[in-house]
Image: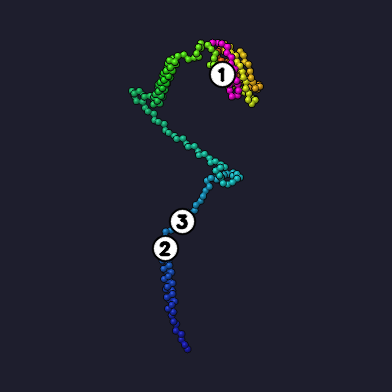
Amino acid sequence: MYQLAARKDPGLGVTTALSVAFHAAAFAFLVWWQQMIPGQGPVQTTYYVDIVNLPVADPRAGSPTQTGNEEKSAPPPPAPPVMTSPAAPTKPVPGKRPSPAPVAESAAFQERMAKLEGKVDAQRQAAAFETLRKKVAARGRVGMPRGTGTEAGSDYTAYLHSRLKDAFRETISFQSKNPFVMVRLTIDGDGRIIRTRFEKSSGDKVFELSVTRAITLAEQTIVPPPGRTVFEGAFVFKPQGVSQQ
């Protein structure tokens, strides 16, 4: 009968020791790594709110996105008025006359300055007129050679032309393309138009009527001719105005 002796394997113990040492080293490395690297902290969640297109109680059909060209933003609310506390009233000092308000003093000063400026301007104008009068007096009488001052010459024609032109601006009216009327007027010594004769006309009756009304309107402001003599002159009326003939 044979007996088997139990033999121990030394390799199993070495392997187990090496495995324990390796896992211990790995665990120590992980602990060191966590201590060296700081933690990232808690994770935050971000929410986005659309403040342009806010929800409404009664939505309408259309695009959910608002564009700048379709609708204008509401104007900002007006700023509240700034409230200022009223100034504390000053108590009058017994025996002392209160001084006038600064506003009253400023207004009185400005009024005095305005009067002084007006007086200075009036003096300057008077001096200018006096200088002009002296220059005219030094040159002698101005007029037409050999004239007596009673002739109804070109000056009265220009005056009458001015009156007709001003009156024609208020009455002008026509219906043809290029209307015109040539009128010869005769004025007596009292400044009244005693005869109106249409020498030439384009045939526009509306334009002729406006010329007649202008002559009647101008007659109200016409002064008598110089020397109260009879004056006669011709004038051409066109849409552009009145000209002397």
Confirm whether the magenta stretch covers residue 240. yes
Local secondary structure at mark 1: helix
* Residue 238 image-quadrant placement: top right
- Check disc 1 and report the residue beneath it: 161
- Check disc 3 and report the residue beneath it: 42
In terms of sequence position, does the residue under pointer 1 or pointer 2 come before the other?
Answer: 2
Answer above or below: position of 2 versus 164. below
- Check disc 2 and report the residue beneath it: 33
Local secondary structure at mark 3: loop
Q: Amino acid at mark 3?
A: Pro
Q: Which residues are magenta?
A: 226-245
Q: Please give left or right for residue 19 compared with residue 191 in the image.
A: left
Q: Amino acid at mark 2?
A: Trp
Q: Amino acid at mark 1?
A: His
- Whether residues under marks 1 and 2 lie with C-beta atoms below 8 angstroms apart, the answer is no
Whether residue 153 is visible here, answered yes or no, is yes
Local secondary structure at mark 2: helix
Task: Give the label on residue 170, or none.
Answer: none
- Whether residues under marks 1 and 3 lie with C-beta atoms below 8 angstroms apart, the answer is no
Q: How would you rate the neighbour count of disc 3 (Cα within 10 Å): few for under 14, some for 14-19, many for 20 or more?
A: few
